[in-house]
Image (cartoon, coloured by chain):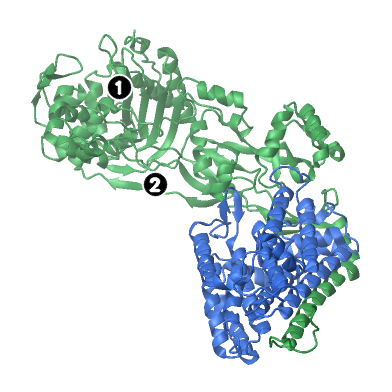
Amino acid sequence: MSAPLAGDSARGWSWKRFVVFAIIIATVVLALGARLFALQIANGGYYAGLSRENRLTLQPLASARGLIFDRNGRRLVENVPTFSIKVRAADLPLSQRQGVVQRLSVLLGMPAADIIEAVDRAASNRFDLVRIAKNVPEDVARIISEEHLSLPGVEVAVEPQRRYSYAPLVSQVMGYTGAVTREDLERLGPAGYLNDDTIGKAGVEASFEEILRGEYGVEEVERDARGEVLRVSRTLREPVAGDSLELTIDVDVQADAETALRWAMEVAGLQRGVVIVMDPQTGQILAMVSLPTYDSNAFAQGITTADYQALLETPGGPLKNYAISENFPPGSTFKLITGTGALQDGEMTDETVLRTAPYLSIGNYRYWDWNRRGFGPLDIYDGFGHSSDTFFYQVAGMLGIDRLAYWANQFGLGQRTGIELPGEVAGIMPSNEWKQRVMNQPIYPGEVYHAGIGQGYDSFTPIQMLNAYAALANGGTLYKPQIVRRVLSADGSLIQEIEPEVIQQLPVDAQVLETMRLASRRVLTSYHTWNLVDLPIVLAGKTGTAEYGVRDAKGRLPFHSWFAAFVPREPRKDPADPDGLEAVSRTDAELAVLAFAYDSNTTGNAATEIVKYFLQLHYDLRVDLRDRDLLVVDNLYGQ
Amino acid sequence: MGTLRAGAARLDLLGGRSTSGTWAHFDLQLAFYALALGVVGLLMAYTNSQGAPLAPGSVFTRGLMWFAIAMVLFTLAAAADFRWLRTFAWPLYGLNLALLILTIAIGSGVGEVSRWISIGGLQFQFSELAKILMAIVLAAYLSGRAGRLGSLTTIIGAAVLALPPFALVLMQPDLGTSLVFGAIVMGTLFLSGASLRWLLVAGAGIVAMVPVAWTFVLADYQKRRLISFMDPAADPLDSGYQLTQSQIAVGSGGIFGKGLTNGSQTQLDYLPVQATDFVGATLAEELGFVGCVVVLILFVALLWRVLLVGWRSRDGFGVSFAGAIASMIAFQLLVNFGMVLGIMPITGIPLPFITHGGASLISLAIGLGIIQSIAMRQGRAEW
């Protein structure tokens, strides 16, 4: 049945086409064969040599991560060389795997199962190095290095590791670096991260990752048949070191703030507290303390599961920066907004007098003043100075919820300040629209009262509250809180000066803000804050006692304490200005400070005590007005 | 000559004794060469299984599974009467377009590319199947134009037929596979007897389109590959590096190779896609010049048998289809192996039988099964 190729087929197709087709195929195959011959036989020895002895591979060249300094140039973190043990699965034959893992387990003192898990977990590509141990002691690293012949696929790498010189003092701001996760790698994609890379995980280390990181270089190396590097043949791309940062933080101020906060928390047995110090003229953060906290070094060295679990279970939650990452009811510190709004909207003047009472009624509900007696007729200075609730219920009623929300938003409350730290939350300022959207109900009149004194749905972050008072202190400029003020190159030269950023100029008359600053001074001179006024420096501010949660059997609520204050320039008391009225009427404040004591339930305002102690330390005052009696817990909520 | 069976085509699957005459014409040589190439593919899957070939989900175990499926499909395609394909050419064309549109709509791939559809955890590349479906439609169309094959209309008609699937594959984007489409169309037209003059004109037109394609069609990574083919040093970090390493792998194989699983270039870090596009490098490194020549001879023998089936075929369908399959295999062999040897630019075209990939193997099995079906029925057709 086989047809001869000579002559056209009976069906009429051309045998010539078949022949040409066959010739083309033959040519193709011959060309391939010739090329094979050239590569494998004619030049086979050359390529075999390249392959056997001098095989070229590319390998990344690590870049140095940028350093971080405080505003006075103190180095907060350095890169120290440490030994890591890495495994390249492809170089570790399966038959030897058991033995190698056993030996590593003995040398490193870690369970064999952990080693196997580490290798397999990251095995998206068997040719990538996987880090199985960090921070290995030098003698162990040396032994592993010497045993490399019996430990195929195992490499000892010298890796820079972050060492935080001022941890845990500045850990919440600095954050830490850690190993990239598979999710990070997927998210970052082609940004040049390797399997065994590190990345900023929290704080400035995370938010300024791109600046700090630098760029990998690439070098071509010749490796022998066992994969060991013979020599670097050439550098294809130099690594680029990361840039350094100079923070706005002053570690001395930070230390004073932490000392003050720790002291009060210890005396009153508090689990959580925040102190933030800001330069109100620029929005630069001088100190930001959130306790409890963690040690950045524990993370940089590779935290153990047990230690991490312990952190997760520590009361108070040390992993969160409460200055920015959680919102709380602001209590009476919010009265700044209510008062300013009513004055600016013309609902009242600084001469308007309102009658205060034990309580106001709406229907059957009674809205009590905090002292349960009322203060009689008050103007804005005394209403704010005594923090009269019935006074501000009335003022809130004049404004209505939407004007109240408008003014809160003008002061930056209920929205992120934009501080360049990860995890900032926005908080809540209720309005008709908000309540309708979230609860599908209108706002009730009593809720307007509560909103006006910083209760009810009002909930803001400590940084928002401080920023509002900083704007009051500087005459109405709302700054974006700043955490980094300079970008420096690896050799320390200035790359970029980061200028303060203005969110907005408050639409409030200078006169109105001056009234509110004087009213803030009245808070002290009226002895509402007890002996705080006796400090030898002038300051003004506002307390807040924010109830939250649910009432216990005796009708009590637990509460947080707040105190937001500012200190004018040259704050020493001047005999010519005995009440400090001239000083606070100026807009040259040099310091704004806020303390927040979570779930404090103390006789006095714990936050005021914290600020008092901080100022004593910061201004090196020769007095000690701390009053431990004010830190006695008397509201034994739930008992 | 055996029994003459007049009338319409029928499935011989369950025909029992009456089909024995047909199976007597089964082309054993063709089946043997294909099987041998498939076995080479399995060897490569074994050696590329990174030390654990028998682990579930390894390249080798999946290769075995696809091999078995391919054998079944080959047998089914051979048993089925190929003349049904002419009847169903248009529905098959519609199916082809539908699968390709589906791939773009829901497919996945690396980056912004959609090439595969996942079925039960397995990725399937429908553009491979599209080549066979394209060959069927083309053969059906050309066989319907018997006597008018020499006119320009034939070429235009074939181009119009090929354009939608070509464009859909290009949109994935998969330049390599769309080039295979082009090769299939050109080769089939040539073998079927289309006008040589107009084919040359069309070929010149395509060459003239290259600058336009460079500007508007090619993605940056494709341009980089072409540039680095011209000058491997231009992009030593990426595609040029692959080319260099591939040549080192091939060259270091020498006459007899380093033996299965002993290729240090391909088993270690040097060649990233040693199981797929650069499988030829593994082959050359581990089996050496001798192994490669054996594989090339197997390809030549297989192509010889395919063309012989076409030559003996009684109708235009057989000739055109054989031309399409031969063009496809020869073109992919040239482009893939040429790429491994550094004489062709990098494109993602698989090496038939040997590149690990279910869709490629299955498409080949179906295509060769149809060739087999043509061989088995060539003497029996009464048109």
Q: Residue B188, percent across and down? A: 65, 79
Letter of the chain that mark 1 sits on in the rendering: A
Labelled disc at residue A548: 1
Chain in blue on the image: B
Query: Which badge, 2 or 1, comes first in the chain's sequence?
Result: 2
Residue type, mark 1 in image:
Tyr
How many residues crowd around disc 2 within 10 Å: few (fewer than 14), some, or many (20 or more)?
A: some
Q: Residue B57, percent across and down? A: 68, 45
Residue type, mark 2 in image:
Pro
- Residue position marked by numbered label 2 in the rendering: A500
Q: Can residue A61 be seen in this view?
A: yes
How many residues crowd around disc 1 within 10 Å: few (fewer than 14), some, or many (20 or more)?
A: some
Letter of the chain that mark 2 sits on in the rendering: A
Above-or-below relation of B186 to A589: below
Total marks in image = 2
Q: In which quarter of the image is the N terminus of chain A?
A: bottom right
SS at circle 1: loop
Above-or-below relation of B95 to A346: below
